[in-house]
Each structure stands twice: as C-alpha cells, then as structure tokens.
Image: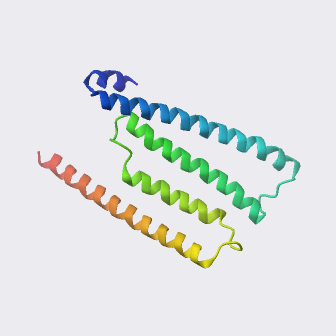
Amino acid sequence: MRDTRRYWPLMTAYERFEHVVAFLLSAIIAMLIALALIQLFVRLVPLLVTGALDPLDHEVFQRLFGMVMTLLIAMEFKHSIVRVAMRHGSIVQVKTVVLIALLALSRKFVILDTAATGPAQVGALAFATLVLGIVYWLLRERDDRVSSEERAQLEQG
C-alpha cells in the first residue's frame, strides 16, 4: 500500500483505474477462496470424524482432490491479480494465464469419470495439455533468456 500511495500521483487515469480494479478483483477472489475453504471444512470434517466418508474411495478422492485443486487455481489467479496491483507487472501475464489453464486441465484429468468419457475427449484434453505445456515452456525459455541478457547488461554496465 505504501508503494501505491507513493506512485498514485504519477499514474495516469487508466493506470489508477486498472489498479483499483485489480484490488477489487483481488478482494472478491480472496472472499471466494475463504468461503470455499470454510465450506470444504464444514462439509468434510463431520464426515471424516464420523467415518461416513472414506477418503480412500476413488470417487471420494476425486471429488476431494478436485475441490482442493479448485482452491489452488483460484489462489494462483488471485496471485496474478495481486501481482498487477502491486505493480510487479502490467496486465495479467500470458504465462500466468497458461499456467492457470494447465492447472484447470490437470484438475479436469483428476476428476474425469473415465467410464463416461470417450477416447476422443480424453485425446482432446491430452492434446490441449500438451500444447499449453509447450507454450508455457516457450514463454519460460523466453523469460529466462531475457533475464539472463538483463543480468549480463547489468554486469557490464
């Protein structure tokens, strides 16, 4: 917040708007994450304590892990928004969006009902995962190359 107050007078109207929107989105997503976490505990703890829920059952495990992964995806999304709000980056980075998409596809594979899913759908999901993985790798390679070039310029200058 200290940096925000310091840079606020230097920001354009649009940058201020972007900053306010990022903070509001971050607060909304934080509330959603907190509510989802509370809901997860409220539903699961009584079932686990009474033994009515077997976490080793495949379907139960899929649902539980799907809920946890949903929270992780939301937290990663919130982190990308906070990064914008704290001025560590401009608009949400493509690399972060690709990472969130990979997490969402991973979640889909975890909760996938293999009996009700056809081979074409599994193949399409696998192909999308492969393509997003390649895109993420290429973006990371680009970022690593740019940061090594910047480091080399700092050492020379």
Front residue of 19 and 64: 19
Question: Which part of the image, by quadrant, shows the C terminus?
Answer: top left
Q: Quadrant of residue 116?
A: bottom right
Q: Residue at x 37, y 23 (%)?
A: 2
Residue 131 located left or right of residue 75: left
Q: Residue at x 60, y 38 (%)?
A: 32
Q: Residue at x 70, y 55 (%)?
A: 64
| Position of residue 135 measured from the top left corner of the image (x, y, whole percent) | 38, 64
Q: Quadrant of residue 145?
A: bottom left
Residue 145 located left or right of residue 55: left
| Position of residue 148 measured from the top left corner of the image (x, y, whole percent) | 24, 55
Count of marks overlaid on the render = 0
| Position of residue 54 measured from the top left corner of the image (x, y, whole percent) | 81, 58
Question: Which part of the image, by quadrant, shows the N terminus?
Answer: top left
Q: Residue at x 38, y 54 (%)?
A: 95
| Position of residue 45 measured from the top left corner of the image (x, y, whole percent) | 79, 44
Residue 40 located left or right of residue 95: right
Residue 147 located left or right of residue 28: left
Q: How is the image coloured?
A: rainbow
Front residue of 33 and 149: 33
Residue 31 versus residue 10 in the image, above or below: below
Q: Quadrant of residue 81?
A: top left
Q: Residue furthest bottom?
A: 119
